[in-house]
Amino acid sequence: MNRRSFLTSSSLVIGSLSLSSFINSAYADAKLSSKQIFNAENPLLLNFNENSLGMSPKAKQAIIDALPNAFRYPDDARSALISELGKTFQLSDKHITLGNGSSETIQAAVQYVANKGQKEQKAVQLIVPDPTFNYAELYAAPLGVNIVKIPVDEKLAFDLKTMQKKADAFDGISMVYLCNPNNPTATLTPTAPLANWIKSAKENVFFIIDEAYAEFASTPEFTSAIALVQKGHKNLIVARTFSKIYALAGLRVGYGIAAPDVIEGIDTFVSIDNTNTAGAVAALASLNDRAYREYSRKSIDVSRQMVVDALNELQIEYVPSHANFIFHKVKGDVKTYQNRMKDAHIMVGREFPPAYGWSRLTLGTPEEMSYFVATLKAFRAKDWI
């Protein structure tokens, strides 16, 4: 794809976006341009579910303002963020734990349950859908936790009934890890069946609900599992992150929400001062910047629709997406597809066994996705997709 055709297609995309109400925000002026050129040194990165809009301008300013006192430890910045998270979710500070990304929250939760099993001399198993985000498995395996993988169904949805049967039949302690919306499929597990299971689960079952992409889900079928914590349930922790909709992936700020006694136990497994000052102040500014959050979400909505329209036009199978990425079929070997995209200066996601033949595509800015769509159509002309 040459520079002229890319700029022409980008201008058309940006022009159509200008008709949308959210484009009138101050953020649009800063983010939407027609000057991005991708090459081997500067490829289009659509492989790690990062938010290429970049962080909120208010987050950047918060970091700048905090720099003169960066020689101090981050206690005050951390406390302010915890307090604001509590207010946001109508919970106390004791319901909140911060993590070096939500990955640390997941790790600490796994260690917390595994340690409980060790103290009580009980076996521990981790039940996960397959495929899903695999960090819980990676953290559990060295602790001697048995990993039980339950394949997703033909629609790539979670098989909650089978997962529940596995938990009910186990004499020890069961951890259940559920990423909702799921990574890599971007599928959504409706609130009702999941909430019913959590409410009725035996005392030996603990849930780790990973809501890294929850802010992108706009369907009425989805209600955050945080609502269960608000109602007093003590058999779960909800992990969230500032990496996705808030675009702070490089600053590593995540958090967990659970009952105070659960948080107290989990906090024994997180590192001290695990959130730095820059990350904490940027997260706090982002949390309070509702305009940016809405802009970020709607930008992804536009990008998603662009890709969906192209996939429909090319009759390429895909899974309806509730996140900032989309899972679609490719023709032939996924590695070959990856390499061809790399040659076109686009980095796309890897294969996620056992979902062979599928590729996870991060949704970048609308301009970036116009470049991807043009490349995808060029691939079809060569019978590559």
Image (cartoon, rainbow, N blue to C red):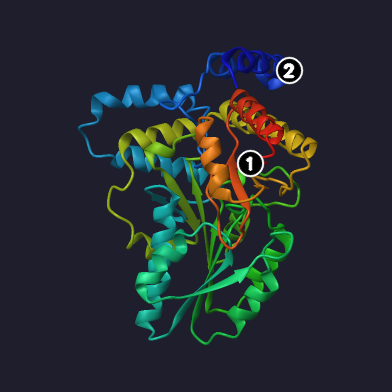
- Element on which disc 1 rests: helix
**Would residue 9 be found to the left or right of residue 277 on screen?**
right
Q: Nearer the viewer, residue 113 or 364?
A: 364
Mark 2, mark 1: which one is toward the viewer? 2
Q: Nearer the viewer, residue 131 or 228?
A: 131
| Residue 57: image location, x then y, percent | 47, 22
- Element on which disc 2 rests: helix
**Would residue 283 be found to the left or right of residue 270 on screen?**
right
| Residue 73: image location, x then y, percent | 23, 39
Which quadrant holds the C terminus?
top right
User: Between disc 2 and disc 1, whose residue precedes?
Assistant: 2
Picture mark count = 2
Which quadrant holds the N terminus?
top right
Q: Quadrant of residue 202?
A: bottom right
Up-down: is 337 above or below 295?
below
| Residue 286: image location, x then y, percent | 49, 32
The amino acid beneath tag 2 is Ser
Q: Residue at x 61, y 54 (%)?
A: 182
Q: Residue at x 38, y 77 (%)?
A: 144
Q: What is the residue that sits farthest to the front in this orientation?
A: 382
Q: Which residue is mark 1?
A: 216
**Would residue 136 be found to the left or right of residue 7 on screen?**
left
The amino acid beneath tag 1 is Phe
| Residue 367: image location, x then y, percent | 61, 23
Q: Which residue is mark 2?
A: 16
Q: Quadrant of residue 340?
A: top right
Up-down: is 212 above or below 341?
below
Q: Residue at x 73, y 47 (%)?
A: 320
Q: Quadrant of residue 71?
A: top left
Q: CA distance from mark 2 to mark 1?
A: 22 Å
